[in-house]
Amino acid sequence: MKRVLLSLLFALLLQTVGTGPVWAGASGEEITLDDLDDKSLTLNHVNPLRLPGRTYDDKAHQTLITGYAVASYRFNDNGVAHGHGTELHFGQDAANTTRFGFDLISVGFTKRFSDYAWVAAAFEIGLHDNASATNTELDVGEIHLVAPVGNGIDFNIGKFNSPVSFEQEDAPLLLQASHSLTYQFGSPAKMSGVLITYPIQENLEIRGAVYNGWDRNAGDGDNNKVPSFMVQVGYAPTQWADFRFSFLRGAEVSNNEDDHRNVWDLVATLTPGRNWIVGIEANYGFDENQSNQAGGGPAEWYTGQVTVHRDFTRNFGTTVRYSIFDDRDGHPDIHSRAKRTMNEITIAPVFHISPEFLGYLGFGVIPRTQHMLSGIDLRLEYRYDWINEPENDNRLFSDVRGGRVNERNMFVAEVVASF
């Protein structure tokens, strides 16, 4: 099965070669609430649950209310023996899970006071670590203040989605049901602090953030005594390619302010042809003096992913993804720390039941690469995980009898409805 899915991913990549770049032109004009049904618009900043930014609403500064809901059927043969990573809604089921569920509803609003000040927030009610744990939380809460200096410096103050990874947390922005290993382990999902963005040119942008730290596993409190920081450069050399380079540093181990985590992350988002989108991410990081191997030293990891999506028709597309997490020294955020290499490959046919509701939205930090979002998506995902682990009793997966195993098959049928 691994070889078949890897061959399919390779075939999809080959098919992009020779296909001329076709893109949707970015809309530079202001848009109003009356324009939401215009399929030709590029709605880059309308929805606060998608991308933070300016809301162009010239009708008496009205408040926009948006959100989404997720329902699913899930099945797996083996489960996760230990909680790990930032992935909350999928991936941490017990062995032999078979269930239907209403997983999540998120409702948000944006209120604009002027071109230089607005507020956005989203509240989320959903199932997180297991089917019985329903949590209500402030998913994002942002106050934007723009300093009229040069092209405008945007100060985003509050709790916001991390701008680092190719993937984002919110289900409407995913091309499949589950997150990659790179998203789970390579960067934080959320940041609480201040994010500063300055567009140098329309295709070149810099960002900097000072924030509390990474989200940790339940029971492992964030180390917020010393703030973490991030710098990012976004560059779009053409209308079919975005690149983002990020560096993050901060104290992330509990009760340790001296040893810092250092992460370098590179994302390329490509639209090589009509109805194609390709995401490539490479990530390297280490925690100073945290290795659990003989001799100590830094706890290093290498991770990356490749995602290929094509819409064959207006109502049907398919995503194929491969990701790897090479944990060299025992990642401090993973319970039962050990040297291991995790792999996953996912294939996800997607039915766009209402493909025109949200228009187009940029996936990159600079909205050049475009991909159509759907008001209602039905996703059928098959995911196969396999792990190379030298220590059998520390394996992450367990079967229904409690025995440790090194592979897992998972199927998810998911409906995502946005409003």
Image (cartoon, rainbow, N blue to C red):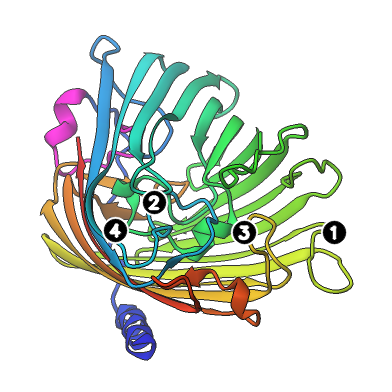
Q: Nearer the viewer, mark 1 or mark 4?
A: 1
Residue marked by disc 1? 289
Magenta residues (range): 33-49
Three-letter code for the amino acid on which mark 2 is drawn: Phe
Q: Quadrant of the C terminus?
A: top left
**Residue at (47% x, 70% y) in the render:** 402
Q: Residues within 10 Å of mark 4 (few under 14, many from 20)?
A: some
- Judge whether residue 274 can be spotted in this image: no
Residue marked by disc 4? 23
Q: Nearer the viewer, mark 1 or mark 2?
A: 1
Please state the horizontal and vertical placement of residue 217, each as a whole percent of the image: 57, 47
Q: Per the image, is 313 magenta?
A: no
Q: Residues within 10 Å of mark 1 (few under 14, many from 20)?
A: some
Left or right of 212 in this view: 177: left
Q: Nearer the viewer, mark 3 or mark 4?
A: 3
Magenta segment's dominant SS is loop
Above or below residue 137? Residue 396 is: below
* Disc 3 to disc 4, C-alpha distance: 40 Å
Please state the horizontal and vertical placement of residue 418, each as a whole percent of the image: 21, 40
* Disc 1 to disc 4, C-alpha distance: 46 Å
